[in-house]
Amino acid sequence: MAKKLKYGIVGCGGIANQKHLPAIAELADVDVVAFCDIIGERAEKANLDFAGAKGKVFTDYKDLLKEDLDAVFVLTPNISHAQISIDALLSGKNVLCEKPMAKTYAEATRMIEARDKSGKLLTIGYQNRYRPDSLFLKAECEAGTLGEIYFAKATALRRRAVPTWGVFLDEEKQGGGPLIDIGTHALDLTLFMMDNYEPAYAVGTTYHKLNKDKKAGNAWGDWDPKKFTVEDSAFGFVVMKNGATIILQSSWALNTTEVREAVTTLCGTKAGADMPQAGSLVINGVKNGRQYMLSPAEGGAAAFFEGKSAKDTDLEAQVFARAIRGQGKLYVQPEEAAAVTQILEGIYDSARTGKPHYF
């Protein structure tokens, strides 16, 4: 058996404990040997839960970067994604950074420059690409089934599901609310299917209509209106350089019954595709003079993996480990993730100025 890869975790909060660490634990050829969090107790607990207390614990990520590690996972608030990732890359570590790639496009560009300078791998945590419905749709798009995709909707709508923990409500540390948190997944999925990463301009609106409400029926309990400084909903109209149009809609709190998250709708010259919910897919078109709708049967999670099907987060972890070993390519390239950040930044800028943002 090949030598085990050694990972370090920076940020031992919810996304580490609920997504990445359980997925890494499924890999027989990887050990997590270092844990870092500014709250030492969280790093200690993660070390106990996922390394049997055998790993090293740090409260300063720069100390963790001195360790002999094959890769570092950057799982911190958005404000620190760029700097920690850059430092990790330049210290000779491969990096998986959680989404969004960064708060700004300039930061994302610096991350790519650090990747190029270091010669190490950099990928971003857009795990929705690995869902069975996403993999099937991507194969159809690549096969030309939809033709030229010229209109799309990227949707991430919650009715009352505002995350009240951590720093989600802090605009300075996160850079925004639902648009940068969950809208980013829907936009990434949409651009990925369209294979289109060149925006021309964007028009955006953000709203603070419900974030001062009390007893709002939130799924995770009442939020503190004084701390809710990010938008509660945001919407964007994006025109790409080739003329394609994307409508992006996102919310944590919105008076709607259309609750759909991390899904896309695609309209092409030959066919269209809808994701009614994450995990389901309907392709529509016309054949032999008749309209049709096709719903692929659920099956294996990924055509490019052998063996049993796995969850999207498990596949994400597998792809990264294999890429480190030179056994395959990354499924999420940082240049693609940077384009997502660029468009989100443009929507926020348009919302602030009341004018279109030209890229």
Image (cartoon, rainbow, N blue to C red):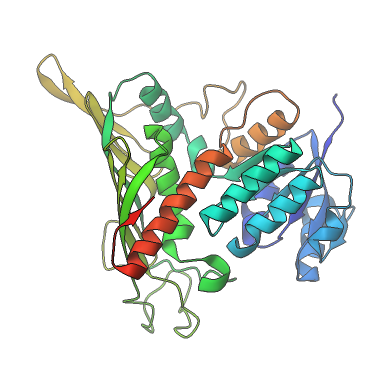
Q: Is residue 279 visible?
A: no
| Residue 15 placement: quadrant | bottom right
Residue placed most toward the observer, 354 or 291: 354
In screen coordinates, is 160 left or right of 22?
left
Residue placed most toward the observer, 131 or 267: 267
Residue 183 point in image, percent of width and height = 41, 54
Residue at the image position 40 percent from the left and 71 percent from the top: 231
In screen coordinates, is 192 left or right of 121?
left
Residue 218 point in image, percent of width and height = 41, 72
Q: Is residue 307 visible?
A: yes
Residue at the image position 30 percent from the left and 21 percent from the top: 145
Number of marks drawn:
0
Above/below status of 134 relative to 224 = above
Residue at the image position 79 percent from the left and 70 percent from the top: 41
Residue 202 point in image, percent of width and height = 32, 53
Residue at the image position 30 percent from the left and 29 percent from the top: 295
Image quadrant containing the N terminus: top right
Residue found at the far front of this picture: 358
Above/below status of 72 relative to 357 = above
In screen coordinates, is 78 left or right of 242?
right
In screen coordinates, is 4 left or right of 255?
right
Residue found at the far left of this picture: 289
Residue placed most toward the observer, 63 or 8: 63
Above/below status of 219 relative to 131 = below
